Image (cartoon, rainbow, N blue to C red):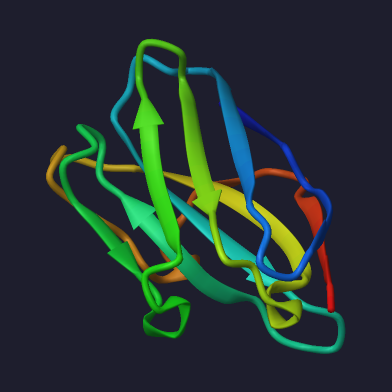
Amino acid sequence: QVQLVESGGGLVQAGGSLRLSCAVSGRTSSSYAMGWFRQAPGKEREFVAAINWSGDRTYYADSLEGRFTISRDNAKNTVYLQMNSLKPEDTADYYCAAASIPLRTIVIITADQYDYWGQGTQVTVSS
């Protein structure tokens, strides 16, 4: 089993930055691809960013326009999402997810391929 705990959310003004963290515990000896998703009130969950096990492959939602950066520190069992130039439309609950993978090069962008999910952290961007 793997447990994921997100942190770093909060209230920020438009144009500001936040860094979300996702601490991974449990069976961390396995290889996991990681991802971030978000769900705004009244909307469906959407993909934000994903990263492979070694951290050298990433993928982002086109809508982000290069404002977000996903990274990971396997020594600390933590994945990060650096969010810059935040907009009110970025307001959502942000979730990290982990997928057990056979190859460390794999990046996963679809939610149904993830095995584990955190409880989420709320991000609110005021205009």
- Residue 47: % across, % down: 50, 72
Q: Quadrant of residue 4?
A: top right
Relative to 28, is 81 on the left or the right?
right
Residue at 68 percent across and 74 percent down: it is 90
Residue at 47 percent across and 18 percent down: it is 27
Task: Give whichever of 44, 121 is nearer the camera.
Answer: 121
Q: Quadrant of residue 63?
A: bottom left
**Position above or below: 74 against 104:** above
Relative to 40, is 54 on the left or the right?
left
Relative to 71, is 63 on the left or the right?
right
Residue at 37 percent across and 39 percent down: it is 71
- Residue 84: % across, % down: 54, 59
**Position above or below: 40 against 72:** below
Residue at 63 percent across and 42 percent down: it is 20
**Position above or below: 109 against 102:** below
| Quarter occupied by the C terminus | bottom right
Is residue 67 at all visible to an observer of this figure?
A: yes
